[in-house]
Image (cartoon, rainbow, N blue to C red):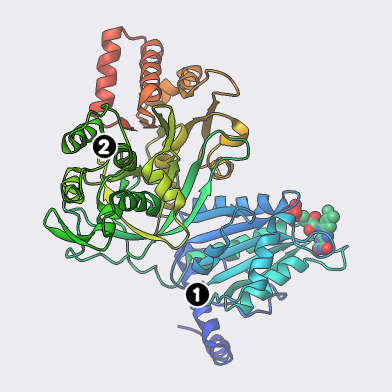
Amino acid sequence: MLTAPKRKIIEELVASSSREELVWLSGYLDGMLANDLPAQPVSPKKQTPEPVAVTGSRKMTIVYGTETGNAKKLATDLATRAKKRSLPVKLVSLDQYRLTDITREDNLFVVISTQGDGEPPAAAKKFYDHIHHNGFRLDHLKYSVLALGDTSYPLFCKTGEDVDAQLQKLGGKCIIPVRKCDVDYEAEAESWFNEVLQAVEHSAGTAPAPAVQPAAEPVLKSNKKLYRAELLASINLHDKGAAKETYHIELAVAEAVDYLPGDSIGIVPENSDRAVQSVIDLTGIDPDKTVSHKGEQFSVRALLRRKLNISNLHERVVKKYAELVQQEIPETKMQLSDLLRIYPLRDAGQFDELLQLLPVQSPRIYTIASAPAMHADEIHLTVEKDVFTVNGKEFTGLCSDYLGSLQAGSGFEFFVQKNKRFKLPAPDKDILMIGPGTGIAAFRSFLYERDATGATGRNWLFFGEDHFVSDFLYQTEIQNWHATGLLGNISLAFSKDFPNIGVHHKLLEQGKEVFAWINSGAHLYVCGQKAPMSVEVENALLSIIERYGGFTAQETAAYFEKLKSTGHYSKDVY
Ligand SMILES: Cc1cc2nc3c(=O)[nH]c(=O)nc-3n(C[C@H](O)[C@H](O)[C@H](O)COP(=O)(O)O)c2cc1C
């Protein structure tokens, strides 16, 4: 095949190359042939550290540290190109980056400038310190750094160089040597982009398929499989001055969870130690005593903590308790500890009867905010802290309080609640998502999934909250999706900045275009508050269809029914 001189060159190259260089070369040639691309000349500047082939996952995390926006612009450009090639990408500013994630990254690309006198940008300081001062290992990490700077400074691109050297020191494998850019960075950046994308795209291996769990796993009574989760992070998504708390909750799961965007998870909350202890104190019961409940044996403490509902008891239960203690008790929702304090049991012998009348704790359902294609081994939720008043007294919802009180590393179980009627359409179909407040959860999942899988359909998000400044949940992610083109249209309604303006008003304002989308086959989704939000949205959609479709009321109703029956209109409201 080869002429003798060419063959000699190849033999010499092979003989003088390390194993890693041969793997890299093989991937390089393979990719070149697959793509019919001309070989890129290899820059003579690239010497250390030795590049290695990307093997395994094609998932890219691109982080940027910027002061005046150059690094952000370049990182966004790289993310956009990667998405065009259907590579799964996470793009995040270093001040938003969860530092503990670094040990779990596969392919990390850092775009970072140097500021001050050879210092990192303020937004990257925590990351810079984290990798320099914490003794973890990054043996599985593959990375590359694009360093921005200015040759007129004595410490040209020092931060990028430091980051590169430190990632390598921690065990990371540099797949493309650090690229240093002067103020006219375009050409250097362009060539780094190409090398990075080529290296990731031609990743020699593929990510291992998620382990499929055998059927004989622990299951709920309802036959739902139980998964074990560990809390990774719980972050309040509101800024200072907000009147509410909504938490972005990240759970680590040790095995592949069988779910799709649009599904939810069910969590059975545990009662707080304080609530359980007050029941024990008020009844004088031995917490270690073994009791039988629905055919299973538990200690009293475990039963009260994990199985029974003891807070905010339903009127029906209060009525049964009144019969047990033979007292007149107003039929209103009450805490078990209040009942025991005000209307004590007549004797210790009634405790067993009390246990029988308490209802079993029911699971709370939360829409999943992560996406299977993007967040392997994790489940994300968007949980608003539920605060309500009973008889003038303020209470917090049991499960939101439970999740909010968990410390990182705490474990609990959940099951997946499938929602067959709330699913993404084919990748080339347009979608219109209406999800104010925690309704954003399902659409965060949708958007990450579409992003990771390279879906080509257009995406339009309607989001609303109280105030722009304090309540724009997932603002950075939404803006990044807009910047990279995934989210072509965003319509926002902040009802306390512009009183009484909700997402339904935004739909009406853009009625003509909304109808054009619907009429050309877009799929509509509503997620979040049932009343009044979903009702107002539905009324807005009906009037848009009537007006811009030129229909009678009857024709409008028929059109809308067809949207529902053909799966073009779906709701997940609560
Ligand atoms: C106050 C200041 C200090 C800087 N110090 C350095 C430096 O020490 N070394 C260097 O290479 N570049 C230095 N630069 C240049 C920036 O790194 C360069 O302009 C870069 O493109 C900025 O990227 P950014 O917009 O992402 O922050 C400095 C720039 C400014 C404004």
* Label 1 Cα crowd, 10 Å radius (few <14 / some 14-19 / many 20+): some
Q: Which of marks 2 and 1 precedes in the sequence?
A: 1
Please state the quadrant of the image where ligand 1 appears. Answer: bottom right
Question: Mark 1 is on which residue type?
Answer: His
Q: Quadrant of the N terminus?
A: bottom left
Mark 2 = which residue?
421
The residue depicted at 23 percent of the width and 43 percent of the height is: 345
Q: Which of 252 and 21 is in front in this view?
A: 252
Q: Position of residue 448 (x, y in %)?
A: 45, 48
Q: How far apart are marks 1 and 2 (CA)?
A: 39 Å
Mark 1 = which residue?
140
The residue depicted at 39 percent of the width and 21 percent of the height is: 532
| Mark 1 and mark 2 residues within 8 Å of each other at the beta carbon | no
Q: Where is residue 321 in the image (x, y as percent from the top left)?
A: 21, 37
Q: Answer yes or no: is residue 283 visible.
A: yes
* Label 2 Cα crowd, 10 Å radius (few <14 / some 14-19 / many 20+): some
Question: Mark 2 is on which residue type?
Answer: Arg
Q: Nearer the viewer, residue 178 or 189?
A: 178
Q: In which quarter of the image is the C terminus?
A: top left
Q: Which of 24 and 314 is in front in this view?
A: 314
Residue 218's disc number: none
Q: Is residue 433 above or below residue 117?
A: above
Q: Does the residue labelled 2 lie within 8 Å of ligand 1?
A: no
Q: Nearer the viewer, residue 108 or 366?
A: 366
Q: Answer yes or no: is residue 455 visible.
A: no
Q: Position of residue 193 (x, y in %)?
A: 61, 60
User: Which element type, helix, strand or loop, lies under badge 2?
Assistant: loop
The residue depicted at 25 percent of the width and 52 percent of the height is: 307
Please state if 355 lies on the left or on the right of 21 as rendered. left
Please state if 101 lies on the left or on the right of 270 as rendered. right
